[in-house]
Amino acid sequence: MSQSLERSTTSKAHRAWFITVFVLFFGRGLMYTAWATRGPDIRDYLGVSLGEMGILAMFFAAGAIAGVIVAGPIINRWGSRLVAVTSFVAMPIFLAAMVLVASTGNTGLTMSLAILFGVPFGAGDFVSNVEAGNLDRASTKSRMPMLHGGYSIGVLLGAAATGGLIKAGVGTVEHLVGVSIIFGAITVWRAVTLPRDNGKLAHHLDATVEAPVAKPRINVPRIVKISLIAFIFVLAEGAASIFIPLALVDAGRTSAEAAFTYTLFSLGMAVMRVIGGWIVDRIGRIRVVAYSSLVAAAGIAMFVFTPSLPLENFAAVLWGAGNSLAIAMTVSAVTDNPATSNRLQSILWTFVYVANLGVGPLLGGIANITGIFVAFWLPVAFMIVATFLSRELKRDPDLPN
């Protein structure tokens, strides 16, 4: 009887934990995509080029890197809840401020606010993945894809809402301020339910536990290669979120059509992440990433070559489906060992936001010379590299059998 009650209590606690982490991913995805899919309007407000929009994305990513760097030590010392609540209070405030300033045409201040929006976004991303990794490790089945699916569902619904709001004539400022208020409140409401001690290192949890004299050894070649996989897939995802709407509008599509195509990219990611846990449990991390990279490469190449909107839409679905699971697999791989999990995640997410930092100016700069559709060949080439790196996702060799 007592064992049954204990299992029931544990199950309820895990379910509440899962819902909270899922909502953190969801809210962040929705807030980001509201900004990304309004990119053409932001560009019009500021009167800037594709390359300058890439620089705006670079400023955002620079802030996110700073957020990742500061989040790790704070979580180790004071736990996940403090970082989660602080991040999800600040994130919507700076998003709303950024669009309000952009609407006045003030490019310099908008760039500065992009950095400030990036800091809590990066910290929120990091703490969400720390909690996701801990939850995944505590579960008997793979939970990481579904948790990352929360972000994709947020992106999907956010992109779909953008298309509908554009057709309804709702302005960019009203849209983004509304999203900031509503989903900022929802994410903070869930963040405060995280246990205070989640994420703390053992010697910060219990005063009788001594801090380790030396940090556990890190397998540097392994973490670098795993982080490169994350870098490649984030670069491809960033290329989609920043440049699919801009590329299609420049190719003659309407803003609503461009937003719909990006919605389909998000749909491909969301569906695959919802069913991804089942796939991972059956074929493992290595094959998931190897197959994903080939599907993503095929989708991007089709998007470049196709001359018609229906085929562009299908290509976007393939691109999203291929891009969906690899990042979750890298997080799962670096959290195999709880002794090194937070440190390895700091390295991983630094690579991730370096990719975010580089994708805007890199593809934007190439696009200014060759056109954006030619620039999309860069993530195609990187995807081929990812297939060869996928073998690094085997179980941490430093763990006992």
Image (cartoon, rainbow, N blue to C red):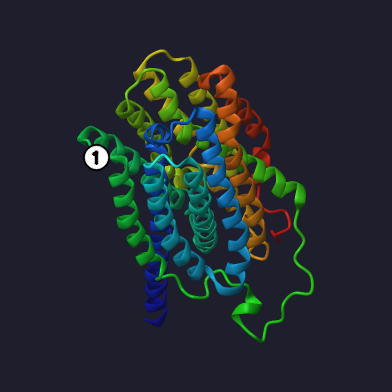
Give the camera-side residue of 274 and 60: 60
- The residue positioned 62% from the left and 56% from the top of the image is 345
Q: Is residue 221 above or below residue 321?
A: below
Rendered location of residue 161, percent (x, y)? 28, 40
Q: Would you call the spot at circle 1 few (<14 residues within 10 Å), some (14-19), or many (20 or more)?
A: few
List the residue tagged with mark 1: 170
Q: Foreground residue, 360 or 147? A: 360
Give, as a three-letter code, the residue at label 1: Val
Q: Residue at x 49, y 28 (%)?
A: 49
Given residues 270 and 138, the one toward you in this image is 270
Question: In the displayed image of the protein, which residue is found farthest to the top?
Answer: 307
- The reply to whether residue 284 is in sight is no
Q: Is residue 42 above or below residue 248?
A: below
Image height of 138 relative to 391, above or below? below
Measuring from the top left, give residue 40's x and y in whole percent. 39, 31
Q: Is residue 336 visible?
A: yes
Q: Position of residue 70 (x, y in %)?
A: 61, 62
- In which quadrant of the rendered image does the C terminus lie? bottom right
The residue furthest left is: 168
Image location (x, y in percent) of residue 315: 43, 24
Q: Give the quarter of the image for residue 208.
A: bottom right
Image quadrant where residue 391 sits: top right
Q: Quadrant of the N terminus?
A: bottom left
Q: Residue furthest bottom?
A: 208
| 227 up-or-down from 166: above or below | below
Residue in the image at 51% along x and 66% along y = 83
Find numbered disc 1 in the image and state the secondary structure of the residue it sits on: loop
Image-based side of 199 in relation to 214, left or right: left
**Lateral position of residue 255 relative to residue 87, left or right:** left
Q: Toward which corner of the image does residue 166 lie, by quadrant?
A: top left
Question: How many circles with numbers are drawn on the protein?
Answer: 1
